[in-house]
Amino acid sequence: MESQYISGINQPENFMLLDLNDASSIVEWWAIYPVRHGALLSDWAQRRPEHRASIQQAHRLIKADPSLRVLLSNAKRQQEDAVGHVILSHYELAAGVGERLEETHAG
């Protein structure tokens, strides 16, 4: 089992245990910052086949929950509006999020 400790953005004393084998853990983490975490999960699903099934299950859980669907819709809208206006993290740059945002905006 591979877990990652994720620190709070503005509160480094707060930590969350992200279990990439547990869809509910992934959903909980995603809901904190859907715009950034959604892009990272998309990348991880491609690059980490051992976690692909749980990431896909998390996506199904998000789409099945009305309150999470609202967050997903808002995140997609923010991604479309943010092209060229957002500072990406190191992890997002490494994951190619900027290129995906540009492709989404252009296409």
Image (cartoon, rainbow, N blue to C red):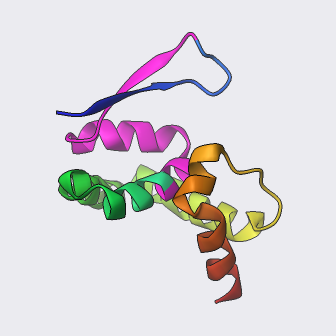
Residue that protrudes farthest toward the top in the picture = 13
- Name the one closer to the observer, 49 or 22: 49
Residue that protrudes farthest toward the bottom in the picture = 107
Picture quadrant of residue 26: top left
Answer above or below: position of 88 versus 73: above
- Residue 105: where, in percent of width, then height? 69, 80
Residue 33 at least partly seen = yes
Q: Is 73 displayed left or right of 42 in the figure? A: right
Residue that protrudes farthest toward the right in the picture = 85
Name the residue: 70% across, 51% down.
88
- Residue 30: where, in percent of width, then height? 44, 44
- Residue 33: where, in percent of width, then height? 56, 42
- The N terminus is located in which quarter? top left
Name the residue: 35% across, 44% down.
27
Magenta-drawn stretch contains 91:
no
Name the residue: 63% across, 81% down.
103
- The C terminus is located in which quarter? bottom right
- Residue 102: where, in percent of width, then height? 69, 76
Magenta-drawn stretch contains 35:
yes
- Name the one closer to the observer, 29 or 69: 29
Answer above or below: position of 32 versus 5: below
- Name the one closer to the observer, 89 or 37: 89
- Name the one closer to the observer, 94 or 82: 94
Q: Is 15 displayed left or right of 49 in the figure? A: right
Q: Is 49 displayed left or right of 36 in the figure? A: left
Range drawn in magenta = 13-39
Q: Is 27 displayed left or right of 107 in the figure? A: left
Picture quadrant of residue 53: bottom left
Answer above or below: position of 70 versus 4: below
